[in-house]
Image (cartoon, grey):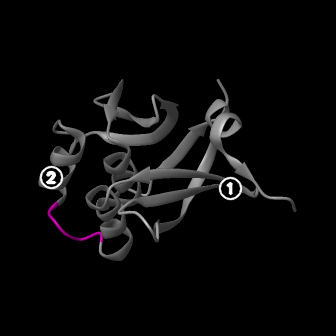
Amino acid sequence: MAQVEVTIDSIRRAMLRQEWSVILKQRGAERYLLIYMGPSQANIVRSQIVDPRFPEPEVYERFLAGADIAKATLESVTVNGPEKNLFRAKLRLTERGESLEMDCPVAGALALALRRSTRILVDEITFDKVGITLPE
């Protein structure tokens, strides 16, 4: 399955609802993916854009990933979905030469990718299903 690299374009609040969206943009193209989330999840991602130094990495990464990944190398984060209106994320890790994949909430995965300057990938199928392409 083909994957494309994305960046976090923006984090925005819906005017009429207490819902936020993280907008991912495909590198080198005018394709976007909106991921809706609650305020606390959006704040997790926003905090890494504003001040990635807090809190301490080990506590933060354990909290977000649900496991101690402080010693592992984060190779990439992959976002896919939606299934039943939910996006999913996978962390691709390497520890002691061994490759691991781990499920993680999308907000946590995006925050970890920002914190560790790691590539964020989206399945091409996800863009085809729910992505937005702007004319050039």
Where disc 2 sits, the SS reads: helix
**Residues drawn in magenta:** 52-56
Task: Identify the residue at horizontal 75%, vertical 58% (top origin).
Answer: 30
Q: Using the rendered view, name the quadrant where residue 49 is placed.
A: bottom left
Dot in front, 2 or 1? 1
Image spot of residue 2 (x, y percent): 67, 29
User: Crowding near pointer 1: few (<14 within 10 Å), some, many (20+)?
Assistant: few
Residue in front for this viewpoint, 125 or 66? 125
Task: Classify 14 as above or below 128.
Answer: below
Mark 2–mark 1 distance (CA, rounded to whole Å)? 30 Å
How far from the left and from the top, in percent, is residue 45? 35, 61
Q: Position of residue 27 (x, y in %)?
A: 68, 55
Q: Is residue 23 above or below residue 122?
A: below
Q: Residue furthest front?
A: 16
Which three-letter amino acid code belongs to the residue tagged 1? Arg
Q: In the rendered view, does 99 fall on the left or right side of 59?
A: right
Q: Main secondary structure of the magenta part?
A: loop
Left or right: 117 as drawn, with respect to 104: right
Seen at 17% across and 36% down, the residue is 67
Tell me which residue sits at (40%, 63%) in the image. 17
Residue count near mark 2 (Cα–Cα under 10 Å), binned few <14, some 14–19, many ≥20: few
**The residue tagged with tag 1: helix, strand or loop?**
loop
The disc at residue 58 is: 2
Q: Quadrant of the N terminus?
A: top right
Q: Identify the residue at the far bottom of this view.
A: 50
Write down the residue under mark 1. 27
Which label's residue is closer to the chain start, 2 or 1? 1
